[in-house]
Image (cartoon, rainbow, N blue to C red):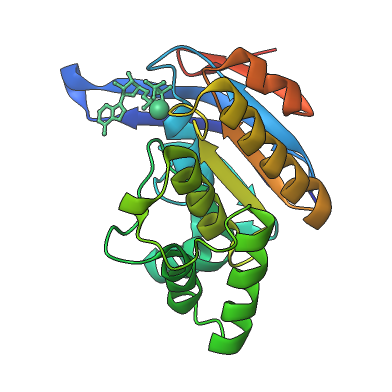
Amino acid sequence: MPALMMDEVRKVYGSGEQAVVALDGVSLEVGDDELLALVGPSGSGKTTLLSIAGGLLRPTDGAVQVGPHRIESYGPRELTRFRRTAVGFVFQGVNLVPFLTARENLLVAAEIAGVERRRARARAEQLLGELGLAGKEDRLPARLSGGERQRVAIGRALMNEPALVLFDEPTSSLDSRLGAQVMELIRAEVKGRGTAAVVVTHDLPMTRYADRVVEIHDGRLVT
Ligand SMILES: Nc1ncnc2c1ncn2[C@@H]1O[C@H](COP(=O)(O)OP(=O)(O)OP(=O)(O)O)[C@@H](O)[C@H]1O
Ligand SMILES: [Mg+2]
């Protein structure tokens, strides 16, 4: 079963004269251990596509399936549960909770999803180690470098072992060496755990870590 299927998805923001067509008939399938790069100019619909795949935004039209979840038919409660357990997000810019340590930023994701505490702690420990953050678990985000903060955000997205992880420009604030490191980490997670990932990037060298590159222009995929 593919990790993500989008069929003829349209998204229109606003209405009447202010209407903006952000996605215009997008059909896309992502395999269950596939790393897909999504590239395209600013305003082309990349964040909108990720937000719809992650159940943060509803499509105006079309079907969206994530693993077994037909999310376009979900009500608010099912959608909230889906977002907490079935997908991971790393948003544009890093958004850690500033008053929680690196470890706590990971644990909070597990807590929201209702994961048992001991299991969550073990998972956080393992991920922080894999992400090269051993010894920095108790630091607040302000005391981490940009690349380290980015890795904590990636760890948080992976905490609940989602089948699909959505990354919105995970390397944009990093220099090319750190960017490459982050992409290697994402690739290792995807291939090691059979997770699927969609990575939005402006950074063309980063696309070489992907299994496939899809381009979007004015809300339409071009292949
Ligand atoms: N909440 C909103 N209300 C109205 N229009 C929006 C909204 N969010 C995005 N848009 C518009 O939808 C289009 C697609 O936006 P989107 O954020 O998906 O682009 P993007 O490809 O992620 O761009 P960037 O690379 O700059 O992040 C743009 O024309 C944008 O102005
Ligand atoms: Mg965007």
Q: Is residue 16 positioned above or below 91 on the image? A: above
- Across and down, in percent, residue 106 comes to 49, 66
Residue drawn at (35%, 60%), measured in percent from left and top?
140
Question: Residue at the spot x=56%, y=43% of the render?
Answer: 166
Image coordinates for residue 19, horizontal then vertical, percent = 25, 22
Where is residue 201 shown, x and y percent of the image? 54, 24
Left or right: 39, with 14 as reference point = right
Q: Which residue lies furthest to the left in this view?
A: 17
- Image quarter where ligand 2 lies: top left
Residue closer to the observer: 194 or 170 = 170
Number of marks present in the image shown: 0
Quarter of the figure with the C terminus: top right
Which picture quadrant has residue 182? Answer: top right
Residue 6 appears in the picture as rendered = no
With 138 as the anchor, is 67 left or right in this view? right
Q: In this view, does 194 lie above or below 128?
A: above
Determine the residue positioned at 51% across, 23% down: 175
Q: Where is residue 80 in the image (x, y as percent from the top left)?
A: 42, 66
In the image, taking residue 187 as reference, residue 125 lies left or right, namely left
The residue that appears at 58% across and 31% down in the rendered structure is: 178
Quadrant location of residue 39? top right
